[in-house]
Image (cartoon, helix red, strand yellow):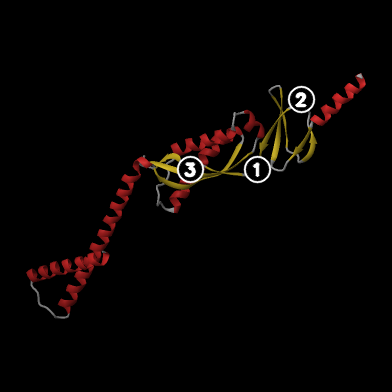
Amino acid sequence: WAAYTGAGALGLFGFGGLARGRTGGAWVLGLFGRYRGTVRRTGLLWVNPLLLRRRVDVRLRHWRSEPMQAADGSGVALRAVVLVVWRVRDTARATLAVEDHESYLRECVEAALARVPVETPGASRGAVEASGDALTRLVVRDAGAVGLEVFSVRPLRVEYAPEVAAAMNRRRIAVLDAQNRATVLTSVVDSVEDTVTRLTTRGLVDLDDYERKALVKDLTVAFCSGRGETAG
């Protein structure tokens, strides 16, 4: 019976150490709180059953965040959705240096958004790229301490925070309206000048200063009215 019991115990010990290594995964081994190595092999393998095994995903991963708090260069509150491309480079640090490396990465992104001004909606492509590069550098530096390799942090969608969205939309509309008015005014002035110059050059009218000013005034009113009706 002792022999049977010993054989059974050895059999259970042997079968208990069997594990299957998968592509893109690794086993982090520990014994009594100490790091004992990492297994990256694939297929059927045997690991000492006394060792504590923690599985870690080492594949390239994409993380799309939920809307996070951010701000532009003027301190206006924004909400930004970012895409982070990353992977676990050092399995020992990722599992032992922090409790949860994915939560740590999220906090690194939030901290970077708090330090780097994010471009407002409608900004140029170059400005958006520069903002993404600055975010990437900060997250790479912070996440590298726990064995995470970050390739890029890119804002996908940026919008104003709900508490300032209405005011900023009114401001944008006012700016666009002012730009449109300036464009219309420039066009009207050019048209009036061209009309008066043609009339006087061709000798169709002979105007003194008073009559010239009156004609300019009438033409300006007529052209502005016409522009207004066309826009309407």
Query: Can you tell which mark lies on residue 48?
Result: none
Mark-to-mark CA distance, 2 and 3: 46 Å
> Residue 193: horizontal and vertical position, in percent?
19, 70
User: In terms of sequence position, does the residue under pointer 2 or pointer 1 come before the other?
Assistant: 2
Few, some or many residues within 10 Å of mark 1 (<14, 14–19, 20+): some
Left or right: 176, with 70 as reference point: left
Residue 71, quarter of the rendered image: top left
Q: Secondary structure at mark 3?
A: helix
Please give the name of the residue rendered at 12% of the width and 78% of the height, measured from the top-left corner: 205
Q: The disc labelled 2 sits on which kind of residue?
A: Leu
Q: Secondary structure at mark 2?
A: loop
Q: Is residue 113 visible?
A: yes
Q: Nearer the viewer, mark 3 or mark 1?
A: 1
Please give the name of the residue rendered at 40% of the width and 42% of the height, measured from the top-left corner: 78
Q: Are marks 2 and 3 in contact (CB under 8 Å)?
A: no
> Residue 84: horizontal and vertical position, in percent?
54, 43
Left or right: 59, with 200 as reference point: right
Q: Name the foreground residue: 202 vs 108.
A: 108
Residue pointed to by mark 3: 134
Q: Is residue 76 visible?
A: no
Tell which residue pokes out farthest to the top in this image: 2
Tell which residue pokes out farthest to the front in this image: 1
Dividing the image into 4 quarters, which one contains the C terminus? bottom left
Residue pointed to by mark 1: 59
Please give the name of the residue rendered at 43% of the width and 50% of the height, measured from the top-left corner: 127
